[in-house]
Amino acid sequence: MLGLLVKLWLFIIGAVAILLVVLNITGVFKPGTISLHKPDGTPCQRIAAADVNHPRIAEVRWLWNPKAYGWGCYFEYDIGDSRTVAPMPK
């Protein structure tokens, strides 16, 4: 029974390692991009304050676009009018 648990944990650790290697090779994983907690929204608020259109909503979201993955800024101006800035600005 103990051997089965050890094999199971080794399989899980190996699967995560393989997943990270594949994400690194494909360019999806970049240090600081994949994180479990939402980053500070101050850069997004700075961009929103400088925008001449004055967005109603400016927040940090997880973005999954064909060109960029990870945390980024989401701006919504009117219903159906929005834009994103990805990756997350510094």
Image (cartoon, grey):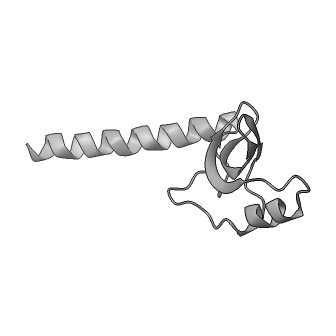
Residue occupying the point 72% across, 30% down: 66
**Can you see residue 2?**
yes
Residue lying farthest to the left in this orientation: 1
Closer-to-camera residue (75/4):
75
Q: In this view, does 27 lie to the left or right of 48?
A: left
The total number of labels drawn is: 0
Q: In this view, does 79 lie to the left or right of 2?
A: right
Residue occupying the point 66% across, 36% down: 25
Residue lying farthest to the top in this orientation: 66
Instruction: Write down the quadrant of residue 82 in the picture.
Output: top right
Closer-to-camera residue (40/68):
40
Q: In which quarter of the image is the C terminus?
A: bottom right
Q: Quadrant of the N terminus?
A: top left
Residue occupying the point 67% across, 33% down: 26
Vertical comparison of 41 with 60: above or below:
below
Closer-to-camera residue (37/19):
37
Closer-to-camera residue (72/7):
72
Residue lying farthest to the front in this orientation: 78
**Can you see residue 33?**
no
Residue occupying the point 17% across, 44% down: 5
**Residue 51: image x %, image y %?**
88, 57
**Residue 69: image x %, image y %?**
67, 41
**Residue 21: image x %, image y %?**
57, 40
**Residue 23: image x %, image y %?**
60, 38
